[in-house]
Structure formats: structure tokens, C-alpha cells
Amino acid sequence: DTEVTQTPKHLVMGMTNKKSLKCEQHMGHRAMYWYKQKAKKPPELMFVYSYEKLSINESVPSRFSPECPNSSLLNLHLHALQPEDSALYLCASTRGHSYNEQFFGPGTRLTVL
Amino acid sequence: GDSVTQMEGPVTLSEEAFLTINCTYTATGYPSLFWYVQYPGEGLQLLLKATKADDKGSNKGFEATYRKETTSFHLEKGSVQVSDSAVYFCALSEQGGSEKLVFGKGMKLTVNP
């Protein structure tokens, strides 16, 4: 298995809703990432988990809450989002520790109404 | 800090035309260099990579050579196809491995039949 999967593919939520995005990989990778991508822009790094511990938080607002339950799974919990948070959310993984080739999932297209 | 500068486009070519997308970088030491491609509605896919000076990465007819003297990693393809229509991102990762990728702004390519 050489892919990163993300669910759901599309998500529409209101500003008072709570939802979660899920990312999974079964390549034995030990580092996992969340990115946010706006239209016509490169991905912006949000969080990095290395060996199941949060190693980087790029000053992301607390309405985004990451979770890494195990080495294969990464969640992003969403609460009280704003319309400007509408974007493509990408998950990626690497083997970790100096292996810097990142494998990306297909993304979740999030719309906040 | 490290940075990547690439042609932004958009660029429109006819099928079978020659493609060059320029990419230059600023970084200390010997970063790893990557080209990622994003097809419409999808996540990023690694197209090719190079990890040391004079390395040539190649995949699907695309090539790029790591040029330390000019700090460049230009992407080329001799004959583009309609299926190559996508956004192309040049990226780097710091020498010795880093949890972060530094992306260029991306270039949208459209290939017409």
C-alpha cells in the first residue's frame, strides 16, 4: 500500500458545527502532516506529527485541533470555523527523520458557510 | 530563510511543444529538491527529485538537473501532452532532512490539442 487516504472528500459545515477530517497511511511512515491550500496557492503547513508527537504547529488557530491516535492515523478536528477557512486540506506523510520525500493524500475540500 | 522562486505562469502550450519551467532556490548547504504536480481536483504527487548536486531526476518524460552553481532545478519535457495539464510546484527541503518543505508559488500549465 503506497498511498495516503483522506476522508471525507468534500465537507460542508456551518460556523457552529464540529467536524473531523481523517487521514490514513499504511506505509510505515512515522511523520504526518496537515496542510491548508487555498486556490492558486501552494500548500501551507499547519501541523507536523513525528513519531506520534506534535513537533510543529505553525501558529494555527485553536479552532483547528490535530490528533494522532497511532502511527497510521491523523485527524484534524474542526470547531467554530470561519468562512475564510474554506480550502483544500491536504495530509502528507514521510518515513520520518531525514527522509523528506512527502507523499500527499487527495485532500478534503472544505466549505464553511 | 530558504526560498524557492519559480515561473508562475499561467502557461498555455500546444501538444508536442517543448516545456521548460524555471526554478531557482536560496538555501544553505545542499538541500534536496523536488517537483510536485497537482492535477485538477487532486492532491500533490511527487514528479521527481534530486538530493545532491548534478543529480538528474526523471519521470514520465520530465527531467530536472540539480545545478549547485546556478542554484537551479529547471523542469523540462520534450513533448507535452494534454494530460500534462496541471499545476507544477518546485520545492526544497533543508540539507540533512527537514520536516518542512519550502514550496514555490506554482505554475499552471494548460496543454491544448
Image: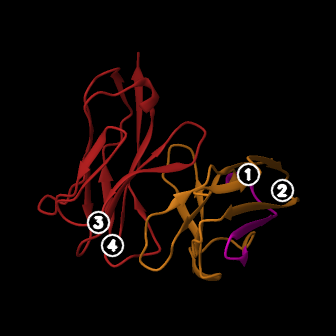
Chain colours: A orange, B red
Task: Point out residue B24 in the picture as x, y percentages from the top left corner.
Answer: 24, 55
- Which residue reaches farthest front? A1
Q: How far apart are marks 4 and 2 (CA)?
A: 36 Å
Q: In this view, does A91 lie above or below B39?
A: below
Front: mark 2 or 3: 3
Residue that mark 3 sits on: B51
Mark 4 or mark 1, whichever is nearer to me: 4
Tell if the residue under mark 4 belongs to the same chain as the one under mark 2.
no
**As displayed, is residue A69 above or below residue A105?**
below
Magenta residues span A67-84
Q: Is mark 1 on a helix, strand or loop?
A: helix
Type of amino acid at the residue the image marks with label 4:
Gly
Judged from the image, the secondary structure of the residue bearing numbered disc 3 is loop
Please identify the quarter of the rendering in which residue A46 is found. Answer: bottom right
Q: Nearer the viewer, residue A6 or A3?
A: A3
Please tell me whether residue A34 belongs to the stretch shown in magenta.
no
Q: Mark 2 lies on which chain?
A: A
Dot 2 amino acid type: Met
Number of other residues with Cα within 10 Å of mark 3, as a class: few under 14, some 14 to 19, many 20 or more: some
Could you say where residue A104 lies in the image, as x and y percent from the top left? 56, 56
Q: Mark 1 points at which residue?
A: A83
In space, the residues marked 4 and 1 are separated at their CA atoms by 31 Å
Pointers 2 and 1 in contact (C-beta within 8 Å) = yes
Same-subunit check for callouts 1 and 3: no
* Nearer mark to the viewer, of 3 and 4: 3
Where is mark 2, residue-wise?
A15
Q: Of the residues under marks 2 and 1, which one precedes in the sequence?
A: 2
